[in-house]
Image: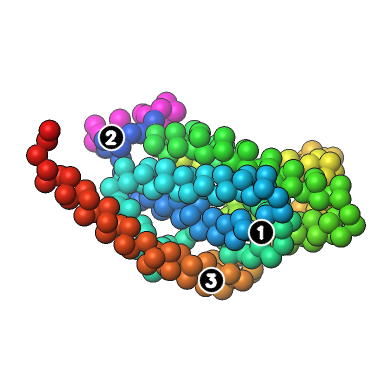
Amino acid sequence: TASVEEQQFTDLIAADSRIEPRDWMPDAYRKTLVRQISQHAHSEIIGMQPESNWITRAPSLKRKAILIAKVQDEAGHGLYLYSAAQTLGTSRDEMTDALIAGRARYSSIFNYPAPSWADIGSIGWLVDGAAICNQVPLCRASYGPYGRAMVRICKEESFHQRQGFEILLELMQGTAAQREMAQESVNRWYWPALMMFGPPDDDSPNSAQSMKWKIKRHSNDELRQRFVNMLVPQAAVLGVTLPDPDLRFNEATQLYDLGEIDWTEFHEVLAGRGPANAQRLQRRRDAHDDGRWVREAAAAYAHKMAAKPAT
Ligand code: ACO
């Protein structure tokens, strides 16, 4: 028989209510949330790299200003999410240590390079577009601090997605070389963006339990499908081709049938053997080392202020 606390937890979940940091929760629920939220936070932080790389090379002052704002938003998302994970009893230092030691996951997508300016468009349109599809339902996640953090994050992601779309639109209305650059970039990002939703449902060990707990509201394949349904009309407006020869509308299901995703590539990236895994992690380690003096100075200052008598 369930304890009173356990019954309360079950009732709150059944009522679509929220679990808050001080509420009792099963250890496995806590562990799953720390896993997902910390991975999500790390993704935001590592995700700054492919784009910040382009800040000095953005083609105009306007593009530079937009890109700086966007990269800064990603840093903010990482910080909200680390804070949400901290309410579950895991310290920021522990999470950071796991990331720089290479023990923590972050989204597969950030292990791909961004060699052309059009990639900034594709990252906004496809990567942030996929992020929104995945994250809008997370605004209703059963854990309060996570769901609430997602609300603001989704609003900002929506701006990111539009700025990416607009970069591609401008390129597609430009010269033949610009159109070619945009299409080439979409060709590289399309499949990895579909992989962001995670493995297929029959190979997703965490989904069933996370859905019972109402952390996840939809399966990986459902959200991937929703994303493609959203992309097809947008691709038509842009005039780009989605690089899947098997993509077609299925009258019977009223959904798009997709070609086969290369899950071997996905597992290689997860195993640390993607095109930019080593570089991303090294950059994060260097940034952590370079920031040591700032952390030390902040700690020394906090110590000094704590020792001062109140005035
Ligand atoms: N990249 C890296 N790892 C992944 C990915 C991915 N795209 N998809 C799944 N995985 C990992 C899972 O973390 C899990 O590994 P773990 O058990 O070691 O944690 C394993 O593959 C099996 O996957 P699932 O059982 O399907 O895992 P889960 O139920 O957690 O679903 C998902 C994965 C959909 C990514 C979920 O964790 C989620 O919604 N996370 C929040 C969103 C997020 O992290 N977004 C980050 C990218 S978007 C951005 O930052 C702009």
- Circle 1 sits on which residue? 57
Residue 224 in view of the camera: no
Q: Is residue 15 above or below residue 39?
A: above
Horizontal placement of 256 versus 103: left or right?
Answer: right
Mark 2, ligand 1, within 8 Å: the answer is no
What residue sits right under mark 3 in the picture?
A: 279
What is the distance, in whole Å, between disc 1 and disc 3 at their CAs? Answer: 20 Å
Q: Where 23 sits versus 308, above or below?
A: above
Q: Which residues are magenta?
A: 3-17
Quarter of the image for the N terminus: give it. Answer: top left
Q: Residue at x 56, y 44 (%)?
A: 69
Q: Count neighbours of disc 1 (C-alpha within 10 A) and say few if under 14, some if 14 to 19, many if 20 or more.
A: few
Does the stretch in magenta take in 13?
yes
Q: Secondary structure at mark 3?
A: helix
Image position of 96 (left or right of 216): left
User: In which quarter of the view is residue 181 placed?
Assistant: bottom right
Which secondary structure class fits the magenta region best?
helix
Q: Are marks 3 and 2 in contact (CB under 8 Å)?
A: no
Q: Judge whether 21 appears above or below 187 on screen.
A: above
Q: Which residue is mark 2?
A: 23
Write the residue at 36% across / 44% down. 83
Location of residue 250 (image quadrant) = top right
